[in-house]
Amino acid sequence: MNRSHHLRVCLLLVCFGHLTVAIAASRLNVIATTPDIAAITRVVGGDQVDVTALARPTEDVHFVDPKPSFIVKLNRADVLIEGGAELESAWLGSLLEGARNPKLALGAPGRIRCNVGIAMREVPLQADRSQGDIHAAGNPHFLIAPTNARQVAHNIGQGLAQLLPDQRTAIEQRVGQFQAQLDAKLKEWKATLAPFAGQPVVAYHNSWPYFGAEFGLQFDLFLEPKPGIPPSSAHLAGLITAMRERKVQVIFQDPYVSRKAAETVAQNTGAKIVPVSQFPGGVKGTEGGYIELLDYLVSALAKAFSTQP
Ligand SMILES: [Zn+2]
């Protein structure tokens, strides 16, 4: 009796062991460079993916701290999903070198680029580093426009389906659902912001041209004088003059920069500071995902425009 009991336990363990292996094998271990990519990948990948973002939503995505733990994560990953337009170029390359993971090599199926099929803005004719940290592939902050998020969901879906061919139908269904949800929301968001068409908005960094084009807002005045250069008092004085002339009502404040420059400018112009982020979770209440983030941005903007003196 003792013996048969022992046998039963063994059989059970074997079965359980097989089951565990089977489940683990069908889930892809995905690393996304940024939290917006991670959020869309979770929607598109569903139960088939475990997703980790490297950049935190509150940090400056250009200058992510390349922690040694990231090398371990990249070494163990099946898939790396990146923007593809050099947003991560200051920190991703050395991490990948350290990770030595052939699955994530350029051109491998495990390396998915989000900017495929995106109409890139501000592509320089010649990369001229004297103009600050110029992005040679064009402005890399494309994912904050819903039309581009639509394309990115498609790109991620195609990349994952190539790795999980038996899941292609389910993945494409989830892409379609997300796109339908985005299309419906985009109509709402555009209607909410329509009364403010043509309004200028001041941002710290030139990271909003795609968002501006989508919603008819102008983002051409910045707190930083050049990409990566902190604001000087001479630059802020010029900015204040320009803001008064153009009657700018709103200043975007990213979580990773000090509020000081925005506050100085706000005090001198009467413009309102709106806390923003391009990443779900970068501002409280936007942790839910991409659509929640856009919901927040659109309603915070509309509120700031309509409560001016
Ligand atoms: Zn940038």
Image (spheres, rainbow, N blue to C red):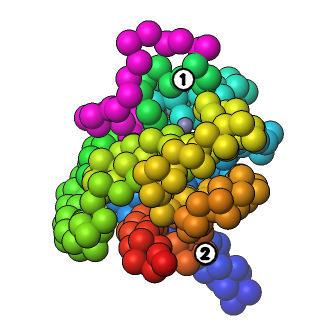
Do labels 1 and 2 touch, CB within 8 Å? no
Tell me the crowding category of disc 1: few under 14, some 14 to 19, or many 20 or more residues within 10 angstroms, Cα based. Answer: many
Residue 230 on the magenta segment: no
Residue at position x 27%, y 34% from top?
119
User: At which x and y percent is residue 202?
Assistant: 52, 52
Distance between the Cα atoms at labels 1 and 2? 31 Å
* Residue sitting farthest toward the bottom: 1
- Report the quarter where the N terminus lies: bottom right
Q: Is residue 135 above or below residue 220?
A: above
Element on which disc 2 rests: loop
Residue 277 visible? The answer is no
* Figure disc tally: 2
Predominant secondary structure in magenta?
A: loop
220 sits to left or right of 55: left
Q: Determine the secondary structure under disc 1.
A: loop
Q: Which residue is mark 1?
A: 134
Check disc 2: other Cα within 10 Å, few if <14, some if 14-19, many if 20+: few
For ligand 1, give the image quadrant: top right
Q: Nearer the viewer, residue 298 or 306?
A: 306
Query: Is 101 drawn above or below residue 59 in the view shown?
Result: above
Q: In this view, which residue lies farthest toward the right?
A: 68
In the image, is residue 6 above or below residue 76?
below
Residue 90 appears left or right of 125: right
The residue type indicated by label 2 comes to Lys
Q: For the residue marked with disc 1, what is the amino acid?
A: Ile
Q: Position of residue 9 (x, y in %)?
A: 65, 79
The boundaries of the magenta stretch are 111-130
Label 2 sits on residue = 284
Depth check: give the residue in front, 83 or 63.
63
Q: Residue at x 73, y 87 (%)?
A: 2
* Residue 290 point in image, percent of width and height: 42, 64
> Residue 300: where, in percent of width, then height?
46, 73
